[in-house]
Amino acid sequence: MHDYTPVPVNGPSERLRRLIAQTGPISVARYMAEANAHYYASRDPLGAAGDFTTAPEISQMFGELIGLCLADLWSRAGRPPCAYVELGPGRGTLASDALRAMRAAGLAPEVHFVETSPVLRNAQAERVPQAHWHEDLSTLPEGPALLAVANEFFDALPARQLIRGARGWHERLVGHDGARFAPGAGPAVPDTAIPAHLRTAPEGTILEASPASLGVVRDLARRIAAQGGAALVVDYGHDRSSAGDTLQAVKAHGFADPWVEPGEADLTVHVDFEALGAAAAESGLQVLGPTGQGAFLTRLGIDARRAALARTAPERADALDQACNRLVAPEQMGRLFRVLGLAAPSWPAPEGFQ
Ligand code: SAH
């Protein structure tokens, strides 16, 4: 079902063109930030009729197993007062499935959503009316332990790119060639900003970094260290920091040109899980994984959950098999999608990582 009303405002294309004409090329991070702010503020991009489909929209089993994982952890931590926190909850599907599973396990946390899109806040309010909404993490409650979840959130946060030239590294900047936006090498960046093992990479090599993502993880980690709790971060990306241009635009379930019509397609980069884990470790958090989404869901019991659902609704058995396969199979989402666990030093570790 597609229940959104598109907001009739122009994308940032014209504004960015004028800005570049007046003040010169802009960073890739700025380009991505402006594009995605408009993209998410003006539509619900999820589902068959939208641009892409996410794990919680494939099957209720995804959110239920995340909920069970958090409820089990909470129980082993001595059942303290808790808040469920979700970053970029989309339509609220994951949260509503997770909260139902938590309730069945005796956990009814207060609910806090970090979400900037008014269109998606409306969709979330339909499924999780009791939620409290936040623009960023600074206004999250300071008392309770935090059980945080982020699915396909960090890939949408702005990343900068650096490119290796003939003699050294440069910031990659976005200009406009009259027909389309065009990335090129900008000012030199000192070698000290580049991880040692990548400094002498071949000319043309691209490095990405997302200061926005690291800022969010640092804020979240500080809160979890102080208040107790844990976080599960699910996304596509690499376990170890590495070189490569992973900026991509997705529209109508296919790839689009990221340098045309910013704000009309979803711009993402692969998540650098090594960098996220290191940012959380600065506050002393335990870092689990990353592990594959398939292995994670299998360890949490997706096969038993699928069998139980199929017993109560035999006519859905085939659909459940297919959904399970999409989430778990290595050639589907099972390996590309990684799950990173973070936990307060004083807390037990979440299940699913070994
Ligand atoms: N987690 C959902 C949606 C993923 S899409 C799912 O799995 O289906 C990305 C989500 O992050 C959307 O809800 C989008 O509005 C939100 N988002 C993107 N950039 C954001 C930002 N800077 N701050 C808060 N939310 C953001």
Image (cartoon, rainbow, N blue to C red):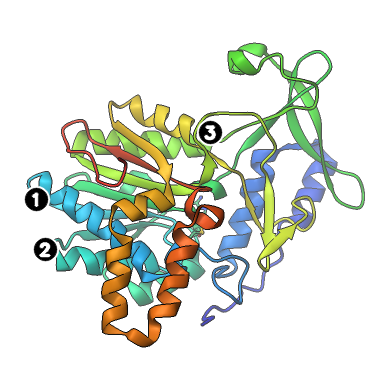
User: Residue 6 appears at what percent x and percent y?
Assistant: 61, 75
Residue lying furthest bottom in this view?
Answer: 315
Residue lying furthest left in this view?
Answer: 78
Say which of 124 and 201 sits in front.
201
Q: Residue at x 33, y 85 (%)?
A: 314
Q: Which mark is residue 211?
A: 3
**Would residue 189 be found to the left or right of residue 119 on screen?**
right
Say which of 235 and 322 sits in front.
322
Give yes or no for contact between labels 1 and 2 (Cβ–Cβ under 8 Å): yes
**Would residue 94 be found to the left or right of residue 45 on screen?**
left
User: Residue 123 appears at what percent x and percent y?
Assistant: 44, 73
Label 1, secondary structure: give it: loop
Q: Decide if residue 1 is in sight here.
A: yes
Q: Circle 2 is placed at which residue position?
A: 106
Label 2, secondary structure: give it: loop
Give yes or no for contact between labels 2 and 3 (Cβ–Cβ under 8 Å): no
Q: Residue at x 41, y 27 (%)?
A: 278
Q: Earlier in the sequence, mark 1 or mark 3?
A: 1
The amino acid pointed to by label 2 is: Gly
The amino acid pointed to by label 3 is: Pro
Residue 167 picture quarter:
top right
**Which is more foreground, mark 2 or mark 3?**
2
Residue 301 picture quarter:
bottom left
Mark 2, ligand 1, within 8 Å: the answer is no
User: Residue 253 appears at what percent x and percent y?
Assistant: 66, 66
Q: Circle 1 is placed at which residue position?
A: 79
The amino acid pointed to by label 1 is: Arg
Q: Earlier in the sequence, mark 2 or mark 3?
A: 2
Q: Is residue 263 above or below residue 278?
A: below
User: Residue 197 appears at what percent x and percent y?
Assistant: 61, 15
